[in-house]
Amino acid sequence: MIKSTLLMALISVSTVISQEFVVENDMRLKEGDPYYQHLDITYNHKISEHFTPFVGYRFINENKKKWEHFSRFHTGFHLTAKVGPSKVAARSRLEYTPDWNLKSDDLTFRERVKISPFTVGQTVKYSPYVFDEVFFGVSNRAGYNRDRLGVGLDIKFNNSVSLEPYYFAEF
């Protein structure tokens, strides 16, 4: 069964506090109404041009039937490579969502591959991309549980502010 949803980040603002600390805000729409928003606070430790481990915390507001608020820890790493004008980025991420009602915590592994064939622009940079992200439950929903295929456009105004409209289908 395909659950296809048009999701658009109204604005994804990455604020670089230092070279390592990043704060990102992402708000998504579903059929014109906001239904998801998260704020990430992440520490990145760039080991090389191609390998960056990270650890972070995400505050989430979600409106499926009513607004709910929760948060999760995440850790993982980014692997990046350039091939001519193209950039390939892989992100491996482990997320831990504690159940503050002490019913059942959630541990999820996510693997995303993002390919950007080129970047154009001098002051403002435009990078179209495609991505595939798979989710594997480690705890209460063990095994493969969904896949996201998507396309988008990363519009970078400078090193701190970007806008990313995108679409993905979730399987």
Image: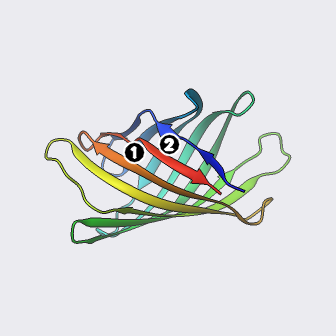
Q: Residue at x 61, y 37 (%)?
A: 60
Q: Residue at x 30, y 43 (%)?
A: 155
Residue assigned mark 2: 40
Instruction: Indicate the secondary structure of the residue bearing disc 2.
Output: strand
Instruction: Indicate the secondary structure of the residue bearing disc 1.
Output: strand
Q: Is residue 114 left or right of residue 29?
A: left
Q: Is residue 12 left or right of residue 2?
A: left
Q: Is residue 114 above or below residue 29?
A: below
Is the residue marked by circle 2 packed among few (<14), some (14-19), or many (20+) residues within 10 Å?
many
Counting from the top left corner in percent of width and height, residue 10 is at: 44, 32
Counting from the top left corner in percent of width and height, residue 103 is at: 86, 46
Q: Amino acid at mark 1?
A: Val
Q: Quadrant of the C terminus?
A: bottom right
Q: Residue at x 62, y 48 (%)?
A: 4
Q: Amino acid at mark 2?
A: Asp
Which residue is the extreme one toward the left? 122
Q: Earlier in the sequence, mark 1 or mark 2?
A: 1
Q: Is residue 106 above or below residue 36?
A: below
Colouring rule applied to residues: rainbow
Residues at discs 1 and 2 in contact (Cβ within 8 Å): yes
Q: Using the image as rendered, state which of residue 149 and residue 35 is in the foreground.
A: 149
Residue assigned mark 1: 22
Is the residue marked by circle 1 packed among few (<14), some (14-19), or many (20+) residues within 10 Å?
some
Give the image quarter of residue 66: top right
